Image: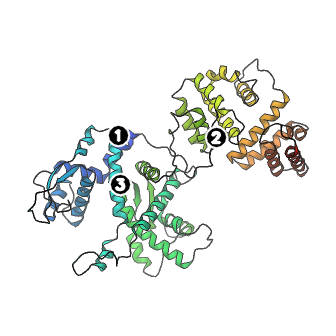
Amino acid sequence: MPGARPAGRPALPPVRLHSDAELARDALATPLLSRAVRLARWAGPETRVGAGGELVDEQLPAAAQALDLPDDEDGAADASEAWRIAVDTGLVEIEEEGEGEGEDEGGAVTAGGNLTLITGGSPQDILALWQDALEAVVSDAIAPLLDELSGVLGPDGEIDFDALDWDPEAESAFLDGVLGNLYLLTASEGGAGEGPVPLPALAASVIVPDDMSEPTDDVLEQVSEAMMRLDDQFRLLEPIGLVEYQPVDEALMVEEGAETRGPTGASAAADDEDVSRYGLVKLTPLGLYGVRARLLEAGAVAPAVGDLADKGADALLDGVAYYPEEAARAETLQWLGLRTPAAAAGDLLNAARGTDRGAPLRRLHCQQALALVGADAEPAVRDVLDDRELGGLARVWLAERGATDVPPPPESMIFWLAVDTIAAQLDAEGDLEELQGLVEGLVGRHSGFFDAAWRVDHPATADVLEAMGRLHGDRRTAKEARKAAFKARSRPAS
């Protein structure tokens, strides 16, 4: 049975991910996870930790030295963060001490079960470990800043959360929105691609309403504040390998002063100041994988090239319906690679049948897929020469390969194919000028085109003729198309 018409163009474009093996190597090479692994191997029974599992202050210099970090506050902070990741990912474990120990004392440190995965685990194991580390860093990124906490300490030195103006759900939603937009820009054909995204534009993308032509001062202030928050967050997310980040120039912040905002949105690109001074960010290949995993976890539809390789032909043709051209070709090649040419051709042609709204687009992608199979598809293609729905595309395919002994198509098949082809192009929402040229070419090659076209027993006939009336450049011909569409709609159902 042919597949149903897709629900519509997916919200997120398909991404092309590196192999799991490549991504796992990238994960192990990230500064934060690699330091966590080194500390897990360095630690032993004599390693002292606090009640929360953190390294005690006296241990930090030795931990920093084990990581070849400088003997200063920054080195100690980096060592402390790497240790926390080692604990959170199960690279080390803290065994609880018995009763009677001081409340500020932690337990004994032992190697965690996940440490063996570093050398003995699969790429998927390594990526799962990295994903746990990423979630820990994301939690840090949305947490209140230290200077925000200092103002809400109670008399006992504990944080007064009621007085803290911090909404963890809102902070998480904001960062997720930013990462989602960065993912969309990275994945979109014709989007940011390999290039970095200016921080002002990224901040504006989640602050400025789509229908706001000129941001208000209040909105610009929000964008400026978001930029500074994102600057802090991306500095945290870079060591785990999620992004490549060029931070906001600290000298620029001094130059701007308290009363002046940096450029936002589109104005950033036009500003005389080098936009890179306001921060540049891009997802790494590992980051693309990580954000997609988080999107999937949240229930989003985030396709990746290769997802359909083990699915049926109907799933392939429906799945690539709205893929960009390069992604559709790559997906189809992976699908074909798992099948013999003859079997693949037969499955594709069978899946292309149907009278549902998605069928014309399936047939278009079937024809494109068959072009990748080559001559081995010929027997399966010849088998459908008499099929009303597939006989036209079969003849086109054979003619393009110079095949002989191809019977000429009946006139009804010629017009059915014309309607089906335009219906597919309309559904694909392709290049308007290209579609206009197709329409004018069809009408020009067939005298009395509309006299025959309105009689075509195709579900999309009336819609196609109406579209031809909108697209054809000649007013008289466009009027003929609209009249033909009216006749098609008035025709009794067969």
Q: Identify the residue under disc 1.
A: 123
Residue 444 lies in quadrant: top right
SS assignment at label 1: helix
* Label 1 with label 2: CB-CB less than 8 Å: no
Q: Identify the residue under disc 2.
A: 4
**What amino acid is found at the position of numbered circle 3 in the picture?**
Leu
At x 50%, y 39%, the residue is 307
Q: Position of residue 99 (x, y in %)?
A: 10, 60
Residue 412 drawn above or below residue 157? above
Give the residue at the far left of this rendering. 100
**What amino acid is found at the position of numbered circle 2 in the picture?**
Ala
Report how far apart the C-alphas of labels 3 and 2 lie in the structure: 38 Å
Report how far apart the C-alphas of labels 1 and 2 lie in the structure: 36 Å
Residue 488 drawn above or below residue 2? below
Report how far apart the C-alphas of labels 1 and 3 lie in the structure: 16 Å
**What amino acid is found at the position of numbered circle 1 in the picture?**
Pro
